[in-house]
Image (spheres, helix red, strand yellow):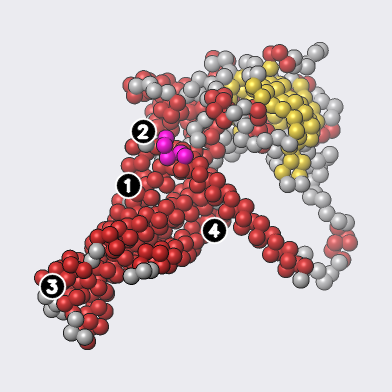
């Protein structure tokens, strides 16, 4: 029993100190963003590796998710003779939920894990320490640009995901299954609300981008500088990001769409 | 013969330093002086915290007790910006080189210049080529760090360390894992850079011959204490058993060959235990 209590106490303490470290890390990162702004080159390079290199996985996944939505939606809606509203269903699912959530999960797997591994290995090979000794703050030079890049890329990637998904749904719905193309688009246009649907979706993806970049960078920065430590940190990034994204999605959805 | 270094002409002065990691005492009340313009070596077996000492001098770690003064500044009392300004005048050569792997050799050497100065790119080019020429690798400027051999990486890191013309350089195990030719090149470089640029050098090493060949003064550290100090010649003729064992590389002596364990026979006979 005492052993159990000891273990519980120790784990609680380590979790809380880690939470404290990560909060402190986040504050440092945020204050470092100011020094990134005069050097847009640093940001653009990171946006390329975090954002542009995720294009392919986001586009292809978005296309397939949209196509599946088109199929499933058609089967259900046609039972009620409401296949004309397929466009609304596809677009609403994508813009509100699947776009932000699935692209954030993919982003965590594709870009987040890469960030953790990169930072962790920089730590293991003394590059961060070396930078400090050259009087260059690694938070400002390495972490903040990557954070900003992740934070800015995420909504763009989510938008891309939703856009491609809607096209995918249209290909299947009106191309293969015979939903009227005009109805697909016009129903979507009249029923999807800019503020309620699109803006809320963008807010979600901004939150996910923030959290995922934070987790990925902190795990890398906090990794034990060995090959095992970096590998564990990378795993934690993906797992913790997934939990945070799904958990936050529930909270955000409850807040945003609660009173409809 | 008076070997004591007077604090007046020492650039780095470590006083009554204690540092521990967990329950393990790394340094126990040690004092060292590093004279201006000289090459001072800190020697001792692996795991005695030699790298830790360099990190303490660079202000990356905080001592439990004692103080470290670099050019009149108490390193651990400085504010962050002051510490960073001091670090611009301190070069450090890491054991691994610590080159930034996403940049070419040229960009690595240019890195501190680009971060800390507003020099035009043409002048940065000239400076970088001069530093690379000094370490003999001007021709390797387009290579990436993963294309370099260990010795080349260390020489590039050295070029980067002298990019801002520091007053001192700290070398962390510069000779470890180097082939004889690279070792020779590094020995020559450390010696000549110290003389030509008027640097103060601190070398942390366990390579007895290379270090003794260039050091002006040597401290031998073991288990948190200074067990011997003096010029290389004095160290060689030291009467301390410990220093003798270290310099000659005898397997057993004051530093035991065996990791502490219980009696061998008892251990073998105590069956039934897994470990």
- Of the residues under marks 4 and 1, which one precedes in the sequence? 1
Q: Chain of mark 1?
A: A
Local SS, label 1: helix
Labels 3 & 4 near each other (Cβ < 8 A): no
Disc 4 target residue: A232
Q: Which mark is residue A183?
A: 3
Q: Is residue B20 visible?
A: yes
- On the image, the x and y values in percent for residue A48 come to 32, 47
Mark 4: few, some, or many residues within 10 Å (few <14, many ≥20)? some
Q: Which mark is residue A48?
A: 1
Pick out the residue farthest to the front.
A259
- On the image, the x and y values in percent for residue A98 come to 33, 67
Does the magenta run of residues contain A185? no
Marks 2/4 same chain: yes
User: Which range of residues does the magenta coloring cover?
Assistant: A31-35
Looking at the picture, tell me which residue is in the foreground, B20 or B139: B20
Mark 2: few, some, or many residues within 10 Å (few <14, many ≥20)? few
Q: Which SS does the magenta portion mostly show?
A: helix
Labels 1 & 3 near each other (Cβ < 8 A): no
- On the image, the x and y values in percent for residue A107 come to 38, 58
Does the magenta run of residues contain A33? yes
A213 shown above or below B198: below
- Of the residues under marks 3 and 2, which one precedes in the sequence? 2
Marks 3 and 4: which is nearer the front? Answer: 3
Local SS, label 4: helix
Labels 3 & 2 near each other (Cβ < 8 A): no
Marks 1/3 same chain: yes
Q: CA distance from mark 4 to mark 1?
A: 26 Å
Query: Which residue is painted at 50% across and 20% down in the image?
Result: B165
């Amino acid at each position: 029993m005492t052993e159990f209590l000891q273990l519980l106490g120790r784990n609680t303490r380590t979790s809380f100190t880690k939470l404290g470290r990560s909060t402190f890390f986040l504050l440092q990162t945020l204050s470092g963003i100011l020094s990134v702004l005069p050097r847009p080159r640093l940001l653009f390079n990171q946006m390329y590796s975090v954002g542009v290199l995720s294009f392919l996985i986001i586009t292809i996944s978005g296309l397939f998710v949209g196509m599946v939505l088109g199929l499933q939606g058609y089967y259900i809606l046609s039972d009620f003779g409401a296949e004309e509203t397929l466009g609304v269903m596809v677009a609403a699912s994508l813009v509100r939920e699947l776009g932000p959530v699935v692209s954030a999960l993919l982003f965590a797997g594709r870009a987040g894990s890469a960030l953790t591994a990169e930072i962790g290995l920089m730590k293991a090979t003394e590059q961060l320490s070396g930078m400090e000794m050259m009087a260059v703050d690694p938070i400002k030079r390495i972490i903040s640009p990557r954070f900003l890049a992740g934070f800015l890329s995420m909504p763009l990637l989510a938008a891309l995901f939703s856009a491609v998904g809607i096209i995918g749904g249209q290909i299947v719905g009106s191309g293969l299954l015979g939903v009227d193309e005009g109805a697909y688009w016009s129903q979507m246009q009249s029923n999807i609300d800019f503020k309620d649907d699109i803006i809320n979706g963008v807010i979600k993806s901004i939150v996910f981008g923030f959290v995922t970049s934070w987790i990925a960078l902190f795990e890398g920065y906090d990794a034990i500088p060995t090959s095992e430590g970096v590998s564990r940190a990378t795993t934690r990034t993906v797992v913790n990001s997934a939990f945070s994204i799904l958990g936050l999605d529930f909270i955000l959805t409850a807040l945003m769409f609660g009173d409809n | 013969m008076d070997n004591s270094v007077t604090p007046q002409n020492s650039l780095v002065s470590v006083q009554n330093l204690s540092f521990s990691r967990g329950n393990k005492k790394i340094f126990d009340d040690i004092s060292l002086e590093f004279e201006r313009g000289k090459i001072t070596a800190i020697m001792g077996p692996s795991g005695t915290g030699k790298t830790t000492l360099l990190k303490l001098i660079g202000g990356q770690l905080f001592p439990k007790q004692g103080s470290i003064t670099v050019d009149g500044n108490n390193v651990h009392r400085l504010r962050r910006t002051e510490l960073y300004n001091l670090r611009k005048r301190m070069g450090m050569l890491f054991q691994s080189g610590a080159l930034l792997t996403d940049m070419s050799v040229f960009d690595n050497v240019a890195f501190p210049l680009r971060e800390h100065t507003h020099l035009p790119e043409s002048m940065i080019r000239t400076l970088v080529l001069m530093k690379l020429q000094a370490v003999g690798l001007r021709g390797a400027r387009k290579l990436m760090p993963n294309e370099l051999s260990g010795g080349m990486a260390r020489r590039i890191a050295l070029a980067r360390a002298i990019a801002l013309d520091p007053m001192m350089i700290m070398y962390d195990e510069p000779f470890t894992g180097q082939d004889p030719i690279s070792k020779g090149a590094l020995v020559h470089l450390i010696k000549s850079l110290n003389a030509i640029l008027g640097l103060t050098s601190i070398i942390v090493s366990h390579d007895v011959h290379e270090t003794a060949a260039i050091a002006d003064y040597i401290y031998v550290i073991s288990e948190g204490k200074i067990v011997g100090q003096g010029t290389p010649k004095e160290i060689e003729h030291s009467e301390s058993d410990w220093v003798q064992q270290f310099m000659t590389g005898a397997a057993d002596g004051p530093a035991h060959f065996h990791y502490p364990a219980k009696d061998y026979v008892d251990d073998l006979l105590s069956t039934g235990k897994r470990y």
